[in-house]
Amino acid sequence: MALLVQKFGGTSVGNIDKIKAVAKKIKQFRQQDNNIVVVVSAMTGETNRLIEMAETMQKRPTPRELDVLLSTGEQTTIALLAMALNEIDCSAISFTGHQVKIETDNSHNKARITDIDAEKITAQIDQGKVVIVAGFQGADQDGNITTLGRGGSDTTAVAIAAALKADECQIYTDVDGVYTTDPRIEPAAKRLNEITFEEMLEMASLGSKVLQIRSVEFAGKYNVPLRVLSTFVDGPGTLITLEESEMEAPVVSGIAFSKDEAKITVLGVPDTPGIAYKIIGPVSEKNIEVDMIIQNMSKDDYADFTFTVHRNDYDKAMEIVKETAERLGAREIYGDTKIVKISLVGVGMRSHAGVASKMFETFSKEGINIQMISTSEIKISVVVQEKYLELGVRTLHSAFKLDK
Ligand code: ADP
Ligand code: ASP
Ligand code: MG
């Protein structure tokens, strides 16, 4: 008998009929002699609705109370799904994160899972039940409800699969696998049969929200067999693998992009040792993550400095940098929130030169100006104006023959 952890995302449980359809699907798996633990998200749009409601109460909602509120989205779907299953004679029981002891640290709204007590779940499985666990939530050591950050139900599923040593963790969603790029932007995108953890981790970090980054980290760390599949059409989906199985990996496996970017430029600061630290230090101290950084030196002992942050952090970062810039006597400072980051990802880049230049050539032919560049072993990212997002992704997709 196999043990499967199956996660159904927001669109998969988006309304009553869909929840009933998911229940039928689970029953079929159950009848094929599988033990099943189900993790569900809130109904699509529900988490956003709750956040909006919170913000009408308080401009920056108290993180602890926001978690109490947000956890209700998933609490609703677990109960409804359990009822739907019981109605069709498939015995099921639902649990909130706290009830199955999904312990997290205490960083509200972006908590990390530290421990799961598998016993409670296992006891119910042994009684023949389908166990349904609320995604995206847990509780800290003091019993405060926490949530795991947007898309966090993926991580709940992988963490449970790791704790139970499940045979597979299946992420059911509204696409039938991981694609060469987001099919909503490039309809010619192709489903990948397999993708390595390393590549998936880069794709997720660089903006592909099909899996939450932490779920991929977790799966890699604990060796959890992970697969992305469609709730609505049957198929093999995409397996996230430890090793590339094909003889030769494609140079570029996928294109990721992120609209959550903003950049800040400080012009004409004295080019002295420690200047980068003086500008970036105060930003990092406020827990704002700085991504790409460029510093160019000029002849006259002054330097220009540009870096990117998450768009949500832009206002706060700008405030901090303004203060610093004034202190340093910077000539000018400006920001831009109308930028996006587009990235090529592929383990094959390790052994192939020329990917960057081909990327630049492709953009140059389209007249897309590249503002920033950053590379690592298996990825190349560029920052361009927001209006070039679709054009940029699509021309790269065909230039690197990902549609073939
Ligand atoms: P769920 O609600 O099931 O968690 P998400 O919306 O979080 O679903 O993730 C699925 C979506 O991820 C798809 O609808 C797709 O638009 C988007 N996506 C982004 N990049 C990719 C990619 N490379 N492959 C597949 N889907 C992607
Ligand atoms: N409901 C949460 C969200 O919308 C968690 C999830 O769907 O994974 O981000
Ligand atoms: Mg998701």
Image (cartoon, rainbow, N blue to C red):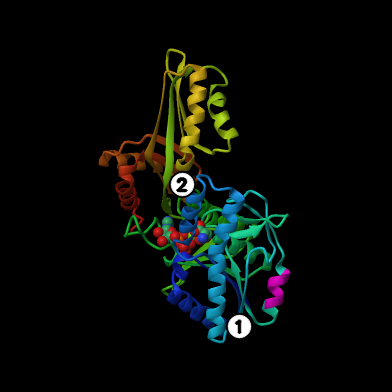
Q: Quadrant of the C terminus?
A: bottom left
- Mark pair 1, 2: CA separation: 49 Å
- Residue tagged 1: 91
The amino acid at mark 1 is Ser
Whether residue 286 sits left or right of residue 47 in the image: it is right
Segment tinted magenta in the rendering? 119-124
The amino acid at mark 2 is Met
- 97 is higher (above) or lower (below) than 30: above
The answer to which image quadrant residue 99 occupies is: bottom right
Q: Identify the main secondary structure in magenta.
A: helix
Q: Nearer the viewer, residue 217 or 86?
A: 86
Q: Is mark 2 within 8 Å of ligand 1?
A: no
The image shows residue 385 at horizontal and vertical percentages of 33, 39
Residue 349 belongs to magenta span: no
Whether residue 338 sits left or right of residue 103 in the image: it is left
- Residue tagged 2: 349
The image shows residue 118 at horizontal and vertical percentages of 71, 68
Q: Does residue 158 appear anywhere in the picture?
A: yes
Q: Residue at x 60, y 33 (%)?
A: 285
Q: Nearer the viewer, residue 71 or 12?
A: 71
Q: Does residue 194 appear anywhere in the picture?
A: no
Look at the numbered discs 1 and 2 and tell me whether their residues touch, using CB distance below 8 Å.
no
The residue sitting at the bottom extreme is 89
The image shows residue 109 at horizontal and vertical percentages of 58, 51
The image shows residue 330 at horizontal and vertical percentages of 46, 19
Q: Could you say which disc has been placed on residue 129 in the image?
A: none
